[in-house]
Image (cartoon, rainbow, N blue to C red):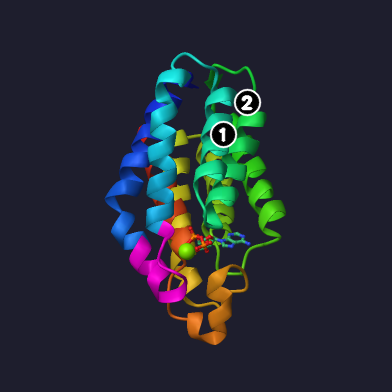
Amino acid sequence: MINQYKVLQIIRQIGNKINEHKDFLTELDNVIGDGDHGINMARGFAEVEKKFPTLEGKDIGTILKTVGMTLVSTVGGASGPLYGTAFMKAGAALTGKSEMDINDFLNVFQQAIEGVMQRGRSTTGEKTMLDAMVPAKEAIEKTLADTNDVKKAMEAGVAAAKEGVEYTKTIIAKKGRASYLGERSIGHQDPGATSFALILEVIASMV
Ligand code: ADP
Ligand code: MG
């Protein structure tokens, strides 16, 4: 079980991790986009950090919804509205809750994926964050069913997200700025899939 205090700690750590990898994410976006993904994500999570004093003691739904709204309103790029929607959808599924377990997590993960798909009019195989998110969720679900071990399940999710990042190198971008490159996007990993793998890595290390 994860309570609302732990959720806040995890969000803070996600912000730290994004900040550590800011330049790397921006370099990746330089190659197939406009070179702002790390900057966008770091700015968004810096704004989230400013909301922390108002979030102490709030339920998980409120925390995640606030994170989502902050990302939507402070990040200019595509990733702000997309990650923002993911967090808002997750928060909506946890309204009033002060604790969550792995099944709640899988449920909100699914909501987050559907939020990105709707908002982005996108699906897997288009070289986006979804190519890390969807296989990760499936791997967590499967490993949990096989082992009933939360830690192992989350580790399998991180491994699948990283494989998803590798997979994005092999395909043509169909969505976002990278799609303007067409075939020239092949050989380069997707920045959004990469940032998602980092985010999941933080979550997995803290549960
Ligand atoms: P922008 O593309 O506006 O500069 P960012 O650089 O912050 O925004 O984010 C780019 C990332 O957003 C991409 O690497 C990709 O993972 C993700 N992305 C872009 N468009 C979509 C979409 N329609 N659906 C899902 N993810 C998308
Ligand atoms: Mg960009």
* Residue with the mark numbered 1: 105
Residue occupying image coordinates x 38% and y 55%: 39
Q: Main secondary structure of the magenta part?
A: helix
The residue tagged with tag 1: helix, strand or loop?
helix
Q: Is residue 145 visible?
A: no
Please name the amino acid that badge 2 sits on: Leu
Q: Quadrant of the C terminus?
A: top left
Task: Indicate which label's residue lies in the foreground, 2 or 1.
Answer: 2
Pick whichever, 127 or 48, lies toward us: 48
Q: Is residue 33 visible?
A: yes
Q: Which residues are magenta?
A: 26-37
Q: Which callout, 2 or 1, points at the residue further toward the start of the chain?
A: 2
Question: Could you say where residue 36 lies in the image, as x and y percent from the top left?
Answer: 41, 61
Q: Quick one: label 2, few (<14), some, or many (20+) residues within 10 Å? A: many
Mark pair 2, 1: CA separation: 9 Å
* Residue with the mark numbered 2: 94
In this view, 162 is above or below 55: below
Q: Which mark is drawn over residue 124? A: none
Residue occupying image coordinates x 53% and y 19%: 99
- As for residue 170 lying within the magenta part, the answer is no
